[in-house]
Amino acid sequence: MKRLLTTLLAVLTAASILNAAEPMSDGHQLTDLWAKYQEAKKADRPVKEAEILGQIKKEAFQKRLPVDFWDAATEYVYTVRRRDWKQGNSLREALQKEVADYDSPIITSFGCVNGADPTGMNCGSTFRSILFKAIPLPSTVA
């Protein structure tokens, strides 16, 4: 019994150490840029946040990374609109154009941009849950 408990404790400890060694990425593959964004957000620097989100959008668009693209695009709208609410309509239109240009059925077929809050608050969580089921994350790819 003592040996079983010791073995169980060792396995649980090893699992927690291995799990903690790999940071959570929310499905993001551009983790370095997202880390920079989180630093800017924590420092409450919305101009820097928007700049980094623009970089993430551009790189995600080029590399066809839908999770990174969607999160950066919707967060960009929220971040810029938080600074200047008058840009809401132009940001919404720009987001619709970006999604159309991305031209992926994964993003466009859910209609999250048309008629929904462009920050992703209304349909973003549903979109992300469907997207995560449809696309294997890097850790699950053989």
Image: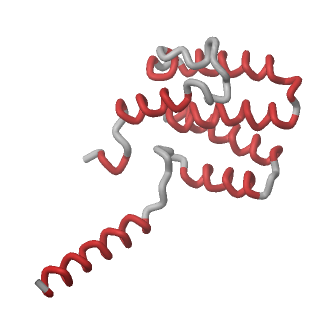
Find residue 101 and report its horizontal and vertical position in percent: 59, 18
Residue at (14% x, 87% y) in the render? 2
Locate residue 85 relative to residue 137 in the image: left or right. Answer: right
Answer yes or no: is residue 65 visible: yes
Locate residue 132 relative to residue 41 in the image: left or right. Answer: left
Image quadrant containing the N terminus: bottom left
The correct choice, above or below, for 129 with respect to 118 in the image is: below
Locate residue 124 relative to residue 8 in the image: left or right. Answer: right
Q: Nearer the viewer, residue 89 or 48?
A: 89
Residue at (35% x, 33% y) in the render? 133
Answer yes or no: is residue 64 visible: no
Residue at (57% x, 31% y) in the render? 70
Find residue 110 and report its horizontal and vertical position in percent: 49, 17
Find residue 142 and report its horizontal and vertical position in percent: 25, 47
Q: Nearer the viewer, residue 41 or 116?
A: 116
Find residue 91 and report its horizontal and vertical position in percent: 76, 23
Locate residue 13 relative to residue 123 in the image: left or right. Answer: left
The correct choice, above or below, for 85 with respect to 19 in the image is: above
Choose top left, top right, bottom left or bottom right for residue 69. Answer: top right
- Judged from this view, the residue extending furthest toward the left is 1
Choose top left, top right, bottom left or bottom right for residue 74. Answer: top right
Q: How is the rendered protein coloured?
A: secondary structure
